[in-house]
Image: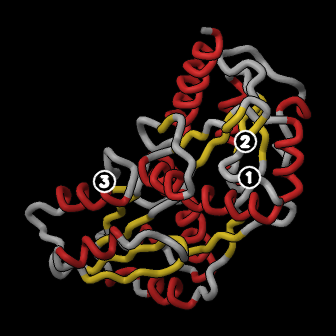
Amino acid sequence: MGQGLSSEASGGVGSGPLQGKRVLVTRALQQAGKLSDGLSDLGAIPVEVPVLEILPPDSYEPLDAALRKIDNFQWLILTSANTVKAMAARCKVLGVEFMDAEHVKVAAVGSATAEAARKAGFRVTVVPDAYNSEGLVASLREAAVGEALGGKRVLLARAKVARDVIPEELKRFGALMTVVDAYQTGLPEGAQELLVAALGEGVDAATFTSSSSVRNLAEVARESGVDFPLTGAAGAVPGFSIGPVTSATMREFGWAPAGEAAVSDIPALIAAVVEGLGTRDEGDRE
């Protein structure tokens, strides 16, 4: 999908439980495809208004320094597919072969991150059942039974703005943490115009895949003179969250989630949209 394009612009919608529903997709442009395609497969019209742009960190120096000494670490924690992409790119620039560091165990925060990491050549050791920071900390503790985290050198690569749950909790267990920025996010140009155009045609739901997408959409709405939470002809637009952390951020901004993914991944988010909009339609018919 191109920026700001709906499936109508690329050949129309199919049939399915979301037939004709216009669903706002707020992911970064280079990441929107999986969510947009999944919605389109169910008959929805994905309306892409990217409110995130993936940018390099302020400096690659801390990340590069850690990668040059990757053999010094016992664990590497990857918090997103964006982190994986940045790590793999810097390894290539530096001529670092991560596969040579066979003793370094890798923890990925979720299935999508783990999949991206494996494709990039990282050997993933731990993937939590709960795809969030708290779940990852719990899984790391379990994985380190008999090999306590105390004294272990742990490299955490993440976005510039991120919660401190992982480093703070692992420090409590004695881990020696090195935290580096792998990337940062910003507001893409043209987001205001895309949002105003999308709301002009109407949206039936909005999806959020991170706390950053909530915060940034709120900022875009403010700059556009648009109400937040978003409203449409039928009243408040139902918003759907990928997980509890994103849901909490939505509530901070006064937007009670209409649904939350059972597991923090794209298929579960789409399932939540199907369930939520279906329930809403049934209520409308009563």
Residue 34 falls left or right of residue 21:
left
**Residues at marks 3 and 2, CA–CA distance in whole angstroms:** 34 Å
Label disc, if present, on residue 135 of the rendered structure: 3
| Discs 3/1, front | 1
Q: Amino acid at mark 3?
A: Gly
Find numbered disc 2 in the image and state the secondary structure of the residue it sits on. Answer: strand
Which residue is more in the foreground, 150 or 64?
150
Label disc, if present, on residue 227 of the rendered structure: 1
Q: Residue at x 53, y 63 (%)?
A: 84
| Contact (Cβ within 8 Å) of mark 1 with mark 2 | yes
Q: Amino acid at mark 2?
A: Thr
Q: Residue at x 42, y 48 (%)?
A: 244
| Contact (Cβ within 8 Å) of mark 3 with mark 1 | no
Residue 194 falls left or right of residue 79:
right
Q: Earlier in the sequence, mark 3 or mark 1?
A: 3
| Contact (Cβ within 8 Å) of mark 3 with mark 2 | no
Work out which quarter of the rendered image holds the N terminus and state it.
top right
Q: Residue 109, image x and y in percent?
A: 40, 56
Please name the residue that numbered disc 2 is placed on.
231
Which residue is more in the foreground, 107 or 103?
107
Work out which quarter of the rendered image holds the C terminus and state it.
top right
| Discs 3/2, front | 2
Q: Amino acid at mark 1?
A: Asp
Q: Residue at x 39, y 54 (%)?
A: 132
Find numbered disc 3 in the image and state the secondary structure of the residue it sits on. Answer: helix
**Residues at marks 3 and 1, CA–CA distance in whole angstroms:** 34 Å
